[in-house]
Image (cartoon, helix red, strand yellow):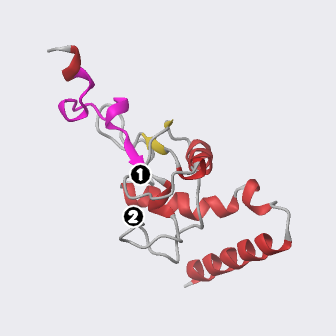
Amino acid sequence: ITLQNIKMAHLTQNPAEKERFICIYPAYLNSKKTIAEGRRIPVEKAVENPTCTEMRDVLTAAGFNVLVENKMYTRELNRDVQFRGRVRVQLKREDGSLYLEKFESRKDLMLYVAEMIPKLKTRTQKTGGGDQNAQQGEGGKKGKKKKK
């Protein structure tokens, strides 16, 4: 085995290897994006312009092993710093069991992150009336969804 082969994720069966962590880009959770632009969850559950930092904070708080990488999502047309980055998350342990029992799939993880980002202090304590009202509105919608 050459050193080059060791770095290639598909040759590693071990889910605990960093190359095997799943990748989540902010665009997957962005309510401002269409499915063609990369959104992967329903728009009513998505978050307005999530950042890698917010995603990392939520996942770290949930107890995940998280890495942030300075990568660009291929469908992202905007090259600004706020749209840069992706989060890698360990979904399974070395023996193949789930890292955290309540998250069975990538989709479970994305929905959880999108649900928790609006609850972050950085989102709830923003100054400026317009932003705050928009956030409260989103929170209300989410509450109604849960009650059904």
Residue assigned mark 2: 38
Q: Position of residue 144 (x, y in %)?
A: 62, 83
Quick one: 13 or 37, which is closer to the camera? Answer: 37
Q: Position of residue 73 (x, y in %)?
A: 41, 51
Q: Residues within 10 Å of mark 2 (few under 14, many from 20)?
A: some
Question: Quarter of the image holding residue 60?
Answer: top right
Q: Residues within 10 Å of mark 1 (few under 14, many from 20)?
A: some
Q: Residue at x 52, y 47 (%)?
A: 84
Q: Earlier in the sequence, mark 2 or mark 1?
A: 2
Q: Mark 2 and 1 residues: CB-CB less than 8 Å, in contact? A: yes
Amino acid found under the numbered disc labelled 2: Gly
Question: Quarter of the image holding residue 142?
Answer: bottom right
Q: Which residues are magenta?
A: 6-24
Question: Quarter of the image holding residue 135?
Answer: bottom right
Q: Is residue 66 above or below residue 145?
A: above
Amino acid found under the numbered disc labelled 1: Tyr
Q: For the residues marked 2 and 1, what is the alpha-carbon distance in whole angstroms?
A: 9 Å
Quick one: 131 or 144, which is closer to the camera? Answer: 131
Q: Position of residue 20 (x, y in %)?
A: 31, 36
Dot 1: element: loop
Q: Position of residue 129 (x, y in %)?
A: 85, 73
Q: Residue at x 44, y 74 (%)?
A: 42
